Each structure stands twice: as C-alpha cells, then as structure tokens.
Image (cartoon, rainbow, N blue to C red):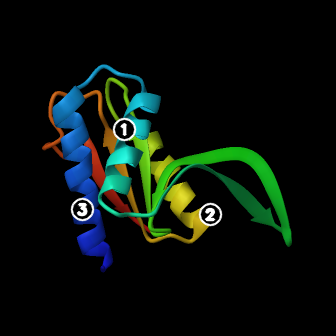
Amino acid sequence: MNLNELTYKIRGCIFKVHNTFGPGLFESVYEAVLAYELKKEGLFVQTQLGIPVEYDEIKLELGFRLDILVENSVIIEIKSIEKLHDVHKKQLLTYLKLTGKKIGILVNFNSSTLIDKESLIRIIN
C-alpha cells in the first residue's frame, strides 16, 4: 500500500470516529478509539512513542511523544481544542523531522466537522 492509499484509509477511520463521538471528549479517548479502529483495518499501530532528539551523536530523551504511528510511516497528532494554531502544525512537522517520516496528519476532533482545512491537515516533511 502506498502512502496515498494509507492516508486515505487513515482519514476514513478518523471520520468514522468523529462521526460516532463528535466533539467534546478528551484527546486520550479519541486516541484510544482511533488506534482501535486503525487496528481493525489491519494496520500496524503504535501509540505514545517517545521521540529522542539526536545531537552530537547522543540521543536525548526529552519527553517528546507522538500520539499514533501507523505502519511505521504516518504520524497522527490528535488535538481536542477550540482551534488549531500554527504551533500545532510546527509540532507535527518537528516530529516528522525528528523521526525521518514523510507524512503526518493533524486532526482536531473538537470541531463540528472535519471537512474544513482547519480541522484535518496533512503535513509533508
């Protein structure tokens, strides 16, 4: 499966979770349910992975944690906030750079719809 097919499948799972619960829950709830839904689709899913920062040939464990990694390829960063800001996009881009991954999906479940480009954003490194 190529990255476009994978992100299409991921987005389908995101929409399913959002259609089921709507806005208003904690990020941890959306993360757990989305991880379950992705696994149901037969995808390899890891949650709350630590991301070390490598500097001068040493790895520094500084507390960075990505929400969901799918098929060791796509990072999903989950928010449940009033509105996404540039800092959230930069956070995901930083995670992509630190892990060497190419594609991330930033989703704000605390939105009445995920159709607008302000609630579901694909970030490319």
Residue 118 seen from this side: no
Q: Is residue 96 above or below residue 102?
A: above
Marking on residue 113: none
User: Spatial distance from mark 3 to mark 2, Cα to Cα?
Assistant: 25 Å
Element carrying mark 2? helix
**Residue labelled with disc 3:** 9
Q: Is residue 33 left or right of residue 7?
A: right
Q: Earlier in the sequence, mark 3 or mark 2?
A: 3
Q: The residue under label 2 is which amino acid type?
A: Leu
Q: The residue under label 3 is which amino acid type?
A: Lys
**Residue labelled with disc 2:** 98
Along the viewing direction, whichever of 82 and 73 lies nearer the viewer? 73
**Label total for image:** 3
Quarter of the image with the C terminus in it: bottom left
Please name the residue shown 33% across and 43% down the image: 107
Element carrying mark 1? helix
Q: Earlier in the sequence, mark 2 or mark 1?
A: 1
Residue farthest along the top direction in this orientation: 24
**Residue labelled with disc 1:** 33
In percent of width and height, residue 114 lies at: 18, 40
Element carrying mark 3? helix
Q: Earlier in the sequence, mark 3 or mark 1?
A: 3
